[in-house]
Amino acid sequence: MASYLDVHPENPQPRTIARVVDLLRADGLVAYPTDSCFALGCQLGNRDGLDRIREIRHLDSKHHFTLVCRDFAQLGQFVQINNAVFRSLKAATPGSYTFILPATKEVPRRLLHPRKKTVGVRIPDHPVAQALLAALGEPLVSSTLLLPGETEPMTQGWEIKERLDHAVDAVIDSGECGTLPTTVVDFSTDEPEIVRYGAGDPTRFE
């Protein structure tokens, strides 16, 4: 049965955040809020957590998981960024964007796109997500909480708890956080390509 944790949307309680981090470090899977919508997240080395996300969302091996990072210092450990791409990303973060970039050797093979050797990364603009990342000290491997057959992600923490009570270990609720997933921009080739239109303004990359 999942823990249901009510967290203040602007000033997350440190004790509650620490409890979530303990769950994550014990190979837990959590549903947590971001600046676009709720996401499923687990620790980088949690192989079982990835399998559970795939099972919940019915994902195949080609799905791009996202490394949700606290800041650029952390993000730079996991993806290769040249100066031009760095400037583009810096102007758009933190925010509701996911960027697909060539991965470094720090990224576990099972997280890579099987052919392109790329990975998705983002820096969220949400106090709860940021508090969680700061306390954890490493990225969260994440995926939008969009259930099979649904057209929009769930927005209510209590509903997530009800639907996924036996599939996740905790639901972190800080109020509604929208239904639009991130805008996804692929920077793995010479020109940026928008592969999903979402919450982030796409015009800066068009």
Image (spheres, grey):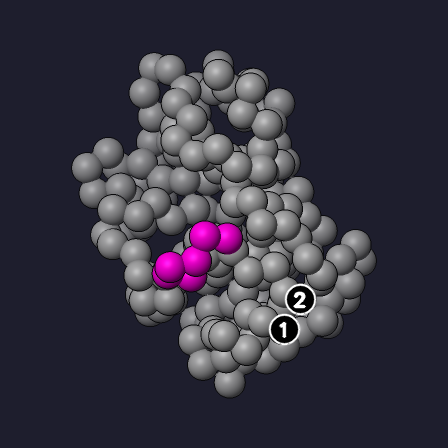
Location of residue 4 in the rendering, given as x and y in whole percent from the top left corner: 63, 77
Q: Is residue 43 above or below residue 110?
A: below
Q: Residue at x 56, y 75 (%)?
A: 161
Are the residues tagged 1 and 2 within 8 Å (C-beta)? yes
Q: Residue at x 33, y 31 (%)?
A: 102
Q: Is residue 60 above or below residue 160?
A: above
Local SS, label 1: helix
Amino acid type, mark 2: Asp
Please give the residue where the numbered disc 2 appears in the rendered image.
Answer: 173
Local SS, label 2: strand
Of mark 1 and mark 2, the one earlier in the sequence is: 1
Farthest bottom residue? 1
Question: How packed is label 2: few (under 14 Cα within 10 Å), some, or many (20 or more)?
Answer: many
Please give the residue where the numbered disc 1 appears in the rendered image.
Answer: 158
Q: Is residue 33 above or below residue 126?
A: below
- On screen, residue 132 versus residue 127, left or right, reads left
Q: Is residue 194 above or below residue 61?
A: above
In magenta, the rendered stretch is: 147-152
